[in-house]
Amino acid sequence: MMFGAGIGIGMLGYATGEPMWHIGDNPVIRMSAAEVQAALDAAGIAIAEGSTAWATYDAQVAAGSMAAIPDLVSPKSESAIVSTYRYSFLHWGLGAWACYALVGISLSFFAYSRGLPLTIRSTLTPIFGRSLSGPVGHLVDITAVVATILGISQTIGLGLDSFSAGLYNFTGAEWLMTTNADGVLVPSTGSMLLALGVVMVCSTLSALSGVGKGIKWLSNINMVLSFALLAFFAVAGSTLFALQILGYGIFDYIIHLPAITFQVFPAAGAGSPGEWQGWWSIFYWAWWIAFAPFVGIFLARISKNRSIREFVVGSIVAPSLMCFLWFALLGGTAIDLELNGSAEGSIFAKSLTAQLYQTINVMLPEAASIISILIVVLLLTYLVTSADSAVLVVNTISAGGSQSAATKHHIIMWGLILTAVIAALLLAGGLSAIQSAMIVGAIPFSFMMILMGLSLLKALIRDDMRAKQDR
């Protein structure tokens, strides 16, 4: 149910595409590129029109005109694999799940140990006390609702993009796609809006049935399909290569985790590590925060009677390892196909969400349509579970944590609001408009999360002190 509630969409959309993008461009590659440019400038070597610094450097080294620079990390090469997964694991590892767990543990503690309503304002009770029953509490919950709607909008938007790309892969219907400014085929706005309508009707019907019925059954279905897809890549993909990536990647990630978590590159313009960090890591930080009230409340609702230790293992460690496995198997297979020449650049040439389908086309052309249909069905179940979970979560917050106040009319109303927000943002500027709105929505809730952490610590310390006094 945890992966069905939003995370599964991200894994399907990014598990192949993100490593493929990072192996061609990441901060380590950009720093190496700066070294190459500096060496060319020092040697007085100009870059020919239509060429690149890397191509010029390689030609000069091959001709013996320049000495090779040690420890360079060049794009789309084996030297970039380690840094590729360092950043992929950063974006989908412990930091992301810790954000979700902070909200989930806080909600669970105050709801189940203190008997407070299961809503965001309850987590700040040790700091604000009774004032939360007035305007302050309303402001807290409204902030959480806005963050939730915009966070799930980003997730659903990504899923719709991948859904349309999958339909195109096995139908070839041209109306599903359009060409962007870079000449790459991407899903058309019309196809995404049509998919949105189907998803939101199904999700509203599922939400009306509740967590124990619709969401639970859909989650079971998509987990079966997810493991079937994972098994396919384990059998037909570059499994040994992927397992090596998984081992080396986790070790490298843990070693570099403190540095890459707190490192902020200066925004030095185009081609700088700071520009890349704004495109990727900062976007992810905002996504984690905007997504935290949604995933946190959902985790809290399905985690009654768990200890904090069990909660941490189940909501931070285990899902991080599962994400690492997905990225290693799917992304590792795509990277291997490109590096060994089988793909001939065809995977690199696709849009981010279409790279999964192109990987399958290269792996097993005769079964590509069947596997694409499986992924599209899997995406549909993930989209429906994510959307109906979001409707239930927003309804819970707006009803002050009361489950009895969540009427069918409220569920339908929030379903329509969520649909309208996503549709409006898609029409206004596509996924980029959704991303911008999500970042704006995440900023206020980031301050709430800081207060939430302090509030939880205060409550736990008080309980510990009382327990010691009673001994």
Image: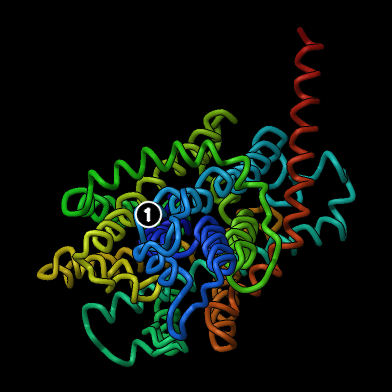
The quarter of the picture where residue 322 lies is top left
Which residue is farthest bottom? Answer: 175
Which residue is farthest top? Answer: 471
Q: Is residue 462 left or right of residue 408?
A: right
Q: Check disc 1 and give the amino acid type.
A: Ser
Q: Is residue 382 visible?
A: no
Q: Which residue is more in the foreground, 394 or 96?
A: 96
Q: Residue at x 46, y 56 (%)?
A: 7
Q: Is residue 253 left or right of residue 335?
A: right
Quarter containing the C terminus: top right
Percent x, y of residue 155: 50, 66
Residue under circle 1? Answer: 219
Q: Residue at x 46, y 75 (%)?
A: 52
Percent x, y of residue 295: 56, 53
The quarter of the picture where residue 281 lies is bottom right
Q: Residue at x 60, y 69 (%)?
A: 410
